[in-house]
Image: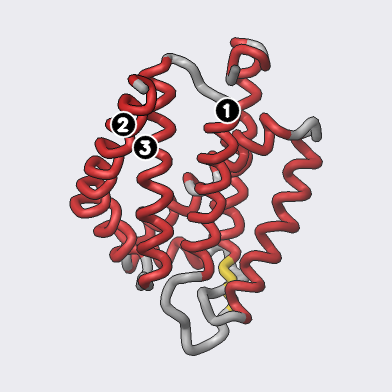
Amino acid sequence: MQDVLKKSSIFLLSLVASWLLLYFFIWDIVMRLMPSSIILNIIIMIVTVFTLYFTALSIVYKKINKTSVDIISFLYFILVIGLTFFKSSYSSVYFNLNPLSIINEFRDYFKHTLILLVSNTLIYVPLGIYISYKSKLRALELFRNFIVYILVIEFLQTISHRGIFDINDVIANTVGFLLGVLFYRVIRVRYGRQKVWS
């Protein structure tokens, strides 16, 4: 009974903390980066609450549970899909296949371009970590599979009018994924696979 009460209290605190985080920080960033929708806001809210909840459980119980990692990873993937497909629609189909166009974007809209570049890089770092943890594939195979995945996502985003096909997004997403793969490999070499998550 005491354990149920403790977990309920942690969940309530996670709700309050996530609301504060969303209200004062996350929604402002999302609104600056892209036009949002009600579905996207709900997805962000759910993912934030449960990520904080499972993170708090791990801190309180001083143990990272594999099931919690799987649930957080699933919620994170839902968030990525939400950010990709549930934002406001674009009226035209546009392809940017020039990787050097980012130079002009930095010159004209430095702050906005920097935020987009950093967020497009960081959004796939967790996937690189999680896939490396779950998969026995070599880094080159992971890289090839991710390239196919991200090209399909960019193409679907374009034909569904939920974004544009931008080669700079592909590059930034791929760099983020590879940083996640590298980060996991470094942690695994340093601490060993069994000690990373129990």
Q: Position of residue 182 (x, y in %)?
A: 62, 30
Question: Circle 2 sits on which residue?
Answer: 10
Residue 194: image quadrant is top right
Q: Quadrant of the C terminus?
A: top right
Marks 3/1: CA–CA distance? 22 Å
In terms of depth relative to the viewer, which is nearer, 57 or 30?
57
Front label number (3 vs 1): 3
Mark 3 residue element: helix
Q: Nearer the viewer, residue 73 or 179?
A: 73
Element type where label 2 sits in the image: helix
Residues at marks 2 and 3, CA–CA distance in whole angstroms: 9 Å
Disc 1 crowd rating (10 Å Cα; few below 14, some 14-19, many 20+) is: some
Question: Which amino acid does the dot numbered 1 rest on?
Answer: Phe
Is residue 176 visible from the viewing direction of this image? no
Residue at coordinates 59% horizontally, 27% vertically from top-left? Answer: 66
Rendered residue at 50%/67% (across/down): 101
The circle on residue 52 is 3
Q: What kind of colouring is applied to the model shown? A: secondary structure
Q: In the image, what residue occupies the spot 43% across and 49% down?
A: 47
Left or right position of 18 against 176: left
Residue under label 1, please give it: 183
Residue 64 sits above or below residue 102 on the image: above
On screen, residue 29 above or below 96: above
Eye-nearest disc, 2 or 3: 2
